Image (spheres, rainbow, N blue to C red):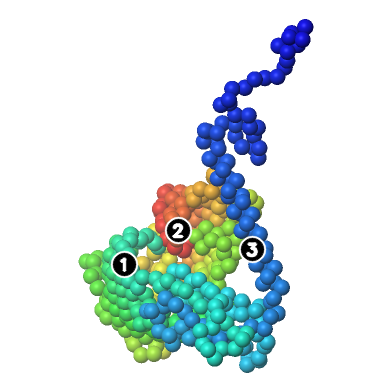
């Protein structure tokens, strides 16, 4: 009987090489499985994350508890900036070391950390450095006080020379270009840039410019530019025009927007007239000199400059010519756009443009200075620059114009992230010559009434920073001289109604 109880015992006998360990910490049972390695990696990463978070917490406690500790800056050292002038770096850094308005404030750890942050951002705005690592170190000078430290910024300078070739499309033109840029040319964040481009309508462009910051904040810059352009207008005006000019500009940015004040001197040459060129174009042929002052202002709050869903855009361009040269006029042009989301997947965009050209000194306006209107980028369903006054088939331009466009842009079903968007539009606009034989009020009224109007549908594809449109539209109202285009129309450019 006892022997029977012994043999019926529930005790399991295991071999000497069989594992008797039970899983702990949720490790996999199969020690040879790939899951074991993943589990070990995950456990190690959690441990490292926990240690890092713990160190960050302790450091924040240490710093937060000593923000009021007296501390001041003995010296600022910028390492790795061998190609940049020390005088320029001093202009960038010194405004953040001096007390504002000459008011002395108690220097503490908090103020030192704030200065370190501000100087780091100021150095980044110069766009001269790829990496900026700020550090607080004990001062090297033996004359430094007990509560003084050195701010050290270890920087890595960007390459000075850059070469770029590209194929560009914009405003109804396509071109191939090559660009050479010398960054930090003279050690003070100057940019020396040269480019050459060849295209279809703008046959060739040569440009050389030198720009430099005028203030340590990098918000105000000066620029000198010389350029040469040859445009082909034979498709709508039976001529070509070559321009050679120089430009000196000062630009700045403030809370209102971007401002630019410039002077330009341009030599224009209307040439290569076709045999059937009109008398208006023939009278414009030859060389003329324009000497003018420009002021440009841009205010932009849109969330996207190509296909914004919300925000506003306003641009003002004012030109006064007649400081020498062959032409004298006052010219103003405005452009605005407002976008708003109606509901998810659909937003509306309203854009307007207007311009006014008034001759001074009794001189008539020239072909090169007049406005042109029409095409897939502004008043759709009309040919390029085909609105307004004409002379035997040649579009000769006008002194006043306005254009407006209302578009409803939506998302493709189940594909809201795609850059392809359908839209429905209505455009209106008019280009006319100012009749100076009647009162200005009556002339402006005639310039506004009886616009050309078109409607249509289409697709917009985003090629940042431009957009491509394929539209099917038709004109509802057209003047006798307008060159309208029913059916499909393709346009690509930077600014569209």
Which label was assigned to residue 163? 1
Callout in the foreground (1, 2): 1
Residue at 60%, 46% in the rendered image: 43
- Residue on which the image places disc 3: 56
Identify the image quadrant of residue 107.
bottom right
Residue at 48%, 71% in the rendered image: 132
Q: CA–CA distance between discs 3 and 2?
A: 40 Å
Kindly give the residue lying farthest to the bottom in the view shown.
102
Q: How crowded is mark 1: few (under 14 residues within 10 Å), some or many (20 or more)?
A: few
Q: What element carries label 2?
A: loop
Identify the image quadrant of residue 162.
bottom left
Looking at the image, which is closer to me, 244 or 429? Answer: 244
- Residue 280 visible within the image: no
- Residue on which the image places disc 2: 464
Which label was assigned to residue 360? none
Tell me whether circle 1 and circle 2 mark residues in contact (CB < 8 Å): no
Kindly give the residue lying farthest to the right in the view shown.
1
Please provide percent x and percent y for residue 144: 56, 88
Counting residues from the N terminus, which is met first, the one under dot 1 or under dot 2? 1
Please provide percent x and percent y for residue 290: 35, 83
Please provide percent x and percent y for residue 436: 46, 81
Q: How crowded is mark 2: few (under 14 residues within 10 Å), some or many (20 or more)?
A: few
Q: For the N terminus, give its image quadrant.
A: top right
Residue at 73%, 15% in the rendered image: 9
Q: CA–CA distance between discs 3 and 1?
A: 43 Å
């Amino acid at each position: 009987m006892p022997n029977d109880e012994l043999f019926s015992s529930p005790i399991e006998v295991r071999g000497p090489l069989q594992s008797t360990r039970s899983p702990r910490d949720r490790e996999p049972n199969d020690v040879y499985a790939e899951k074991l390695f993943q589990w070990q990696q995950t456990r190690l990463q959690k441990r490292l994350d926990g240690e890092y978070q713990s160190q960050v917490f302790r450091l924040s406690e240490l710093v937060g508890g000593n923000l009021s500790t007296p501390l001041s800056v003995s010296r600022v050292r910028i390492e790795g900036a061998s190609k940049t002038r020390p005088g320029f770096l001093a202009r960038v850094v010194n405004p953040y070391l001096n007390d504002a308005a000459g008011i002395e404030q108690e220097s503490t750890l908090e103020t030192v950390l704030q200065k370190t942050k501000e100087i780091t951002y100021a150095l980044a705005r110069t766009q001269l450095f790829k990496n900026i690592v700020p550090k607080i170190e004990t001062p090297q000078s033996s004359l430094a006080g007990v509560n003084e430290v050195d701010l050290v910024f270890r920087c890595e300078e960007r390459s000075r020379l850059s070469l770029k070739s590209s194929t560009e499309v914009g405003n109804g033109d396509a071109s191939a270009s090559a660009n050479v840029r010398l960054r930090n040319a003279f050690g003070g964040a100057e940019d020396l840039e040269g480019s050459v481009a060849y295209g279809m309508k703008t046959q060739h462009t040569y440009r050389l410019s030198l720009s430099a910051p005028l203030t340590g904040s990098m918000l105000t810059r000066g620029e000198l530019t010389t350029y040469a352009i040859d445009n082909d207008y034979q498709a709508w005006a039976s001529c070509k025009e070559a321009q050679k000019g120089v430009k000196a500009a000062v630009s700045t940015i403030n809370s209102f927007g971007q401002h630019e004040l410039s002077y330009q001197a341009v030599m224009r040459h209307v040439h290569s007239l076709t045999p059937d060129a009109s008398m208006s174009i023939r009278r414009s042929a030859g060389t003329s000199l324009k000497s003018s002052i420009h002021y440009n202002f841009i205010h932009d709050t849109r969330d996207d400059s190509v296909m914004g869903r919300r925000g506003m855009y306003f641009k003002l361009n004012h030109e006064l010519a007649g400081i020498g040269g062959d032409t004298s006029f006052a010219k103003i042009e405005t452009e605005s756009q407002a976008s708003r989301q109606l509901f998810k997947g659909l937003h509306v965009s309203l854009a307007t443009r207007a311009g006014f050209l008034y001759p001074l000194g009794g001189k008539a306006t020239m072909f090169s200075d007049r406005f042109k209107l029409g095409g897939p980028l502004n008043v759709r369903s009309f040919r390029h620059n085909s609105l307004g006054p004409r002379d035997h088939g040649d579009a000769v331009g006008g002194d006043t114009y306005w254009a407006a466009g209302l578009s409803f842009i939506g998302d493709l079903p189940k594909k809201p992230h795609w850059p392809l968007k359908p839209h429905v539009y209505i455009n209106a606009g008019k280009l006319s010559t100012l009749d100076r034989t009647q009162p200005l009020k009556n002339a402006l009224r005639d310039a506004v009434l009886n616009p050309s109007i078109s409607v249509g549908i289409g697709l917009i594809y985003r090629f940042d920073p431009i957009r491509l449109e394929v539209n099917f539209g038709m004109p509802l109202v057209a003047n006798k001289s307008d060159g309208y285009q029913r059916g499909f129309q393709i346009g690509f450019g930077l600014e569209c109604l």
